[in-house]
């Protein structure tokens, strides 16, 4: 089989024979489009540290830590600290009933800067945590490791977050499985904790993140800095509308907190928490499980944003939502009413009684100092007692715009990182990089309260969760940690877009068209000469309406033509005469949103015109001057790797090579492309025959974007009789599931990922060329793209991934 790849990143398979000792030199050079990979015999690359102007990427793994050259992590200059649990500790761990294949190791879970010369690092040490200082220069542990029980969880998988701020360590976890979850300040004294009695402040909390917000900066009231913690916990509050066992929370404490004198001694006096909601209320979907957060600072502390990845409580339903919260909303909630429970056992309700003064849970501010309270130990007892019993606020924090930026079924995002970049239109765009549980990286841009997915990259041949994600503007790289490797990718890959249309349609703020090629805006010397359209993804290319298209021989191209009338029929002409026949042998396929040229031949060059035919009147809508050329560069300039260690990585890496089966299944589903346009399609491709039909069968979308059903892919699809069918309008069914999964993918105008143009590249793969314009699109439709992606992806997995032959290394 021909080994072809869309990849830009060579996959290094971890081979124990080759990767011992710990520090293995990279097996392959990694020059392809700047993607680099590091791996060693260590696994579980779960913590990473890279500071703004640093040259080094620090990585914590299982039993080892590494200092990598941040500009090229595959360079052989890596420094290593081997730090594994002793045999005695491992056998004690086994006696505790732990798994000696996964848990009884020293999983490094914390790695951060301590001071200008030292880092601090904590590991689970086979269920007996230890922490140690690391001499940064020499990259060695600089003193005897110390007790880590109060700073680091025992287990490698327990939710955990920690920060070092001014050499004090703040950590949050359920450290030991017997203990209650706790938010601590560990050093120096007084150490502070959360309260367990009479009111338990945290209930089975699963921590995902924390952040310092310097709210003292520019504060005219002498406010304190605050530390925010993000987690999911068991719900306490009573609500009339819904009941959930778990809810997402944000909690905060003040950095200057010293605890109380008698009441709340060695406890936070400033702990408050509230609920973060991320829901699609009209469908009663509540994304209660917080999986990851990313905090983006603003010009002032008030402009701080919290991005969160949320999931559903139903474990067997894959779905993710991304919500954004503003710090000021969170602050408002902490200024609002408190909750309380009168008698333990009952649910919590809003507290309506008298609130003591000074307001419980606030930091020490100038107003308090003026009253002689300059430290939390001076707070009156009634205030502290109130704090002790009222940790929960009544007001929930709603996401900006009241709804998710993105909702995606069939994807479980695990981690994210966000950067801000100025587009050529002068606006600041937030660009999100999100890793999935199966090893993909999605890049998205936030435009007008919606996330537009720019590209999807497959990073690993074997599906594996993204455990950590970092961005470096200086290195212009994204770093992704997973169980088997660390991958370094460029922030953008503009050269992948070979035409002006592709470049503009991508809506990638990093990319601009310079008249000849799609270039990286950041490295281009003259930004004013570049074209970009992030807002609409449509403007700028010359003759955007009547396009000139250059198509490589053998590729597929879609000439778009959307008829404004439902009653009109499209008629295509080439060089003035009507295009004959739309079966596969003709090389053309006609759909309601355009004409597809399949496996373009040079004799298919020419001027194509789309006409709208209605009541026997033919009106020309759009023309394309198509040139089918031999000399176009293959899309990603990749040679099949001789070592055949090749990862299939692309926008949507869809490899369809072994398609004896499906001579061509080109699926473009232009659903409901305008609000109000009703249509429903059934697409069938029969195995082994050149028969394919694209029909409109009925309507299930109504004008306001609500839908009666979602796409269903018959399980029998490809395997069973070779019938590939996408039938919208039927309830989605899957084998075992309760409660029912979402009925509709994008209930109201959430981000679009519908590929309205697919191009086959390299003879066996598809690349998404154009995202549909979400403004015009009925949201339901996007589900089909996901179904489509799944089908194509499945085909890729079943047909194309060769097992690399290790002997060929
Ligand atoms: C890191 O890698 C870059 C590029 O390969 C190289 O120029 C630089 O010298 C390396 N830095 C160190 C500290 O090895
Ligand atoms: C784990 O412990 C079992 C005994 O319970 C032993 O047979 C096995 O070899 C151990 N595995 C490893 C990797 O140490
Ligand atoms: C940083 O902390 C380490 C460990 O406590 C200490 O040995 C070192 O002297 C400190 N460095 C500076 C510059 O204070
Ligand atoms: C608090 O104020 C008192 C008197 O105003 C002063 O003696 C004390 O040192 C102050 N404490 C702190 C921690 O600043
Ligand atoms: C560590 O990596 C192995 C595979 O390499 C994986 O099975 C395991 O779940 C990982 N453990 C953690 C805690 O990530
Ligand atoms: C950038 O391009 C513009 C328009 O072509 C031109 O006027 C300007 O001189 C160029 N600037 C530089 C620094 O090349
Ligand atoms: C585009 O093509 C159509 C049909 O050939 C023609 O009527 C229209 O004037 C063209 N528009 C432009 C901007 O060239
Ligand atoms: C179509 O484009 C080709 C190459 O760009 C050009 O040579 C040709 O004149 C164009 N034809 C028309 C009708 O515009």
Image (cartoon, grey):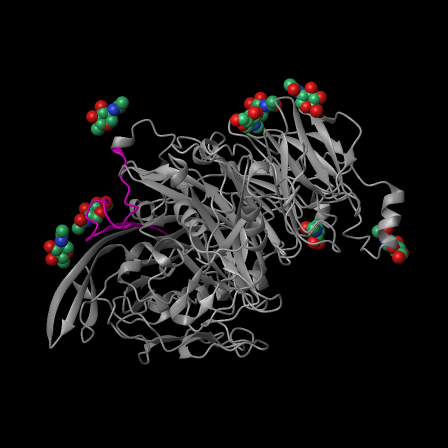
Vertical relation: 481 (above or below) 242: above
Tell me residue 245's x, y (percent).
Answer: 57, 67
Q: Quadrant of the C terminus?
A: top right
> Between 207 and 392, which is closer to the camera in this rendering?
392
Tell me residue 734's x, y (percent).
Answer: 54, 76
Q: Is residue 785 left or right of residue 22?
A: left
Q: Quadrant of the N terminus?
A: bottom right
Vertical relation: 479 (above or below) 780: above
> Between 592 and 685, which is closer to the camera in this rendering?
592
Tell me residue 515's x, y (percent).
Answer: 27, 37
**At x 45% / y 44%, what residue is drawn?**
636
Q: Which SS does the magenta portion mostly show?
A: loop
> Between 737 and 194, which is closer to the camera in this rendering?
194
Q: Which residues are magenta?
A: 529-554
**At x 60% / y 54%, what residue is drawn?**
201
> Between 15 and 290, which is closer to the camera in this rendering?
290
Vertical relation: 380 (above or below) 188: below
The answer to if 544 sits in the magenta stretch is yes
Tell me residue 17's x, y (percent).
Answer: 78, 42
Instruction: Assign ligand 3 to one image quadrant.
Output: top right
């Amino acid at each position: 089989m021909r080994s072809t790849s869309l990849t830009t990143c060579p996959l290094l398979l971890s081979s124990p024979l080759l990767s011992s000792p710990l520090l293995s030199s990279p097996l392959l050079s990694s020059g392809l489009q700047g993607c680099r990979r590091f791996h060693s015999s260590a696994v579980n690359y779960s913590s990473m540290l890279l500071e703004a102007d640093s040259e080094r990427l620090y990585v914590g793994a299982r039993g080892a830590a590494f200092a990598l050259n941040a500009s090229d992590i595959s360079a052989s200059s890596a420094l290593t600290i081997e730090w594994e649990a002793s045999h005695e500790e491992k056998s004690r761990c086994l006696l505790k009933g732990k798994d000696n294949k996964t848990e009884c190791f020293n999983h490094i879970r914390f790695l951060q800067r301590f001071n200008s010369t030292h880092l601090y690092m904590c590991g689970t040490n086979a269920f007996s945590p230890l922490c140690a200082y690391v001499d940064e220069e020499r990259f060695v542990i600089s003193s005897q490791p110390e007790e880590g029980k109060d700073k680091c969880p025992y287990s490698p998988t327990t939710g955990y977050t920690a920060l070092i701020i001014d050499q004090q360590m703040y950590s949050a976890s359920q450290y030991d499985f017997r203990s209650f979850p706790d938010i601590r300040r560990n050093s120096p004294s007084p150490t502070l904790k959360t309260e367990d009695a009479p009111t338990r402040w945290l209930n089975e909390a699963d921590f995902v993140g924390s952040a310092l917000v310097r709210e003292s900066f520019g504060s005219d009231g002498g406010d304190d800095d605050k530390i925010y913690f993000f987690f999911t916990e068991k719900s306490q509050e009573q609500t009339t509308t819904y009941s959930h066992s778990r809810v997402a929370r944000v909690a905060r404490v003040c950095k200057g907190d010293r605890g109380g004198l008698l009441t709340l001694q060695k406890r936070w006096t400033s702990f408050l928490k509230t609920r973060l909601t991320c829901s699609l209320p009209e469908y009663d979907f509540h994304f209660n499980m917080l999986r990851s957060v990313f905090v983006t600072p603003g010009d002032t502390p008030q402009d701080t944003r919290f991005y969160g990845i949320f999931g559903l409580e139903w474990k067997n339903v894959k779905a993710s939502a991304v919500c954004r919260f503003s710090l000021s909303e969170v602050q408002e909630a902490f200024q609002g009413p408190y909750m309380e429970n009168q008698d333990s056992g009952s649910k919590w309700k809003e507290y309506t009684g008298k609130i003591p003064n000074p307001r419980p849970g606030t930091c020490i501010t100038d107003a308090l100092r003026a009253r002689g309270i300059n430290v939390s130990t001076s707070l009156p007892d009634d205030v502290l007692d109130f704090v002790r019993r009222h940790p929960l606020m009544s007001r929930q924090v709603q996401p900006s715009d009241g709804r998710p930026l993105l909702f995606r079924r069939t994807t479980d995002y695990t981690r994210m990182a966000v950067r801000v970049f100025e587009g050529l239109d002068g606006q600041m765009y937030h660009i999100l990089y999100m890793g999935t549980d199966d090893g993909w990286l999605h890049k998205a841009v936030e435009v007008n309260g919606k996330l537009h997915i720019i590209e999807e990259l497959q990073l690993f041949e074997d599906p594996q969760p993204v455990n950590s994600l970092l961005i470096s503007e200086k290195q212009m790289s994204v770093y992704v940690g997973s169980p088997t490797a660390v991958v370094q990718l460029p922030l953008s890959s503009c050269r992948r877009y070979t035409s002006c249309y592709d470049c503009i349609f991508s809506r990638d703020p990093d990319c601009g068209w310079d008249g000849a090629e799609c270039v990286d805006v950041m490295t281009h010397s003259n930004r004013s000469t570049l074209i970009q359209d992030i807002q609409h993804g449509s403007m700028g290319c010359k003759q955007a309406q009547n396009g000139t298209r250059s198509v490589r021989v053998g590729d597929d191209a879609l000439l778009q033509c959307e008829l404004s009338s439902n009653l009109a029929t499209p008629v295509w002409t080439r060089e003035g005469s009507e295009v004959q026949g739309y079966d596969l042998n003709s090389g053309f396929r006609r759909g309601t949103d355009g004409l597809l040229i399949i496996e373009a031949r040079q004799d298919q060059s020419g001027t194509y015109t789309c006409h709208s035919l209605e009541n026997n009147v033919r009106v020309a809508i759009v023309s394309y001057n198509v040139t089918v050329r031999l000399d176009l560069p293959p899309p990603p300039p990749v040679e099949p790797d001789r070592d055949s260690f090749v990862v299939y990585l692309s926008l949507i890496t869809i490899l369809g090579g072994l398609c004896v089966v499906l001579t061509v299944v080109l699926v473009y589903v232009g659903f409901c492309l305008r609000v109000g346009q009703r249509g429903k399609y059934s697409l069938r491709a029969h195995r082994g025959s050149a028969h394919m039909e694209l029909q409109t069968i009925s309507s299930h979308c109504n004008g306001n974007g609500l839908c009666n059903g979602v796409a269903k892919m018959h399980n029998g699809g490809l395997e069973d009789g070779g019938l590939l069918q996408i039938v919208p309008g039927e309830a989605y069914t899957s084998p075992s599931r309760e409660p029912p999964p979402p009925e509709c993918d994008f209930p109201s105008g959430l981000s679009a990922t519908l590929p309205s143009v697919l191009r086959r590249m390299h003879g066996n793969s598809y690349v998404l060329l154009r995202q549909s314009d979400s403004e015009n699109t009925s949201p339901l439709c996007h589900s089909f793209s996901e179904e489509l992606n799944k089908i194509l992806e499945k085909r890729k997995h079943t047909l194309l991934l060769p097992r690399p032959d290790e002997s060929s290394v």
